[in-house]
Amino acid sequence: MKTYPQQVICKHCDSLYTRQSVRSGEAARCQRCHAVLYRGSWLSLEQWLALTVAAAVFFIIANLFPVLEIQFHGQSQAATLAETTMALAHSYASPLAIPLALLIIVCPCLQILLLGWVLWHACRNKIAPGFAPVMRLLAGLAPWSMAEVALLSILIAAIKLSGLVHITTGPGTWALLGLCLLLPVINHQDFHSLWRLKTLKEKRG
């Protein structure tokens, strides 16, 4: 499939534009409906990669360490995100287990891995293998990565159960909070800069 990285379509009115360079902090807007088309990146490639690596660390902690610990009559039970999803799969709400796992585990994981793959090669002034399909997949994954849904669910569960049992937030909850703060930052940079690097590299090669 042929790609057109120099073209951008307004998501609100379908107007087609040719991309123009914008500086950090600036935004290109649609002339018809004035919606934001794209913004200039305020991070360098190295900074972008560093934040992506930090997001990967938060993701690992959030999935390996408990998000909540429940203590009741001297007994305690801790659960990670994966264990919470598995518990949901064995409850009356089992149809929600797979969509939830995709939204809070699979999609964020793919986003971080694929973006890190592209940025790692870009920082070395190289084009990542499978660059075009990876970039298209990243664009498709963006709306489906919802780590904040998991964080909100944990907070609601903690509030509802706090009157019945003793609830302690685990390291996974704080890592999930960090992930929720980082994902919007790394996902809202100007991905066109990566396409531009690819185009320049192909012209030189």
Image (cartoon, grey):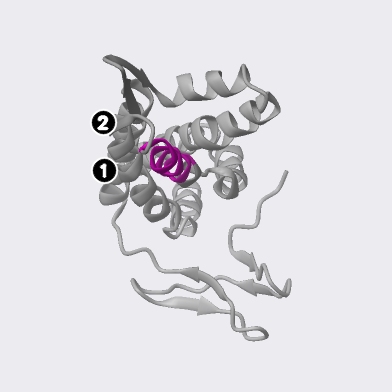
For residue 152: magenta? yes
In the picture, the disc for residue 129 is none
Query: Residue at (59%, 50%) from the top-left corner?
Result: 143
Residue 160: image location, x then y, percent:
44, 41
Q: Identify the mark at residue 171; answer none if there is no mark.
A: 2
Q: Nearer the viewer, residue 1 or 184?
A: 184
Tell me the element at label 2: helix
Residue that mark 1 sits on: 50
Q: Main secondary structure of the magenta part?
A: helix
Few, some or many C-alpha atoms within 10 Å of disc 2 (few <14, some 14-19, many ≥20)? some
Q: Earlier in the sequence, mark 2 or mark 1?
A: 1
Q: Position of residue 114 (x, y in %)?
A: 47, 35
Q: Identify which residue is drawn at 44% across, 32% down.
A: 113
- Which x, y percent locates residue 173? 33, 36
Query: Residue at 39% of width from left, 77% of height from top?
Result: 26
Question: Label 2 is placed on what type of residue?
Answer: Pro
Hey, what amino acid is under mark 1? Ala
Magenta region, residue range: 150-162
Q: Nearer the viewer, residue 140 or 44?
A: 140
Residue at 62% x, 86% y is 31
The quarter of the picture where residue 22 lies is bottom left
Image quarter of the N terminus: top right
Q: CA distance from mark 2 to mark 1?
A: 21 Å
Q: Is residue 153 magenta?
A: yes
As displayed, is residue 80 above or below residue 49?
Answer: above
Residue 85: x, y in percent? 53, 24
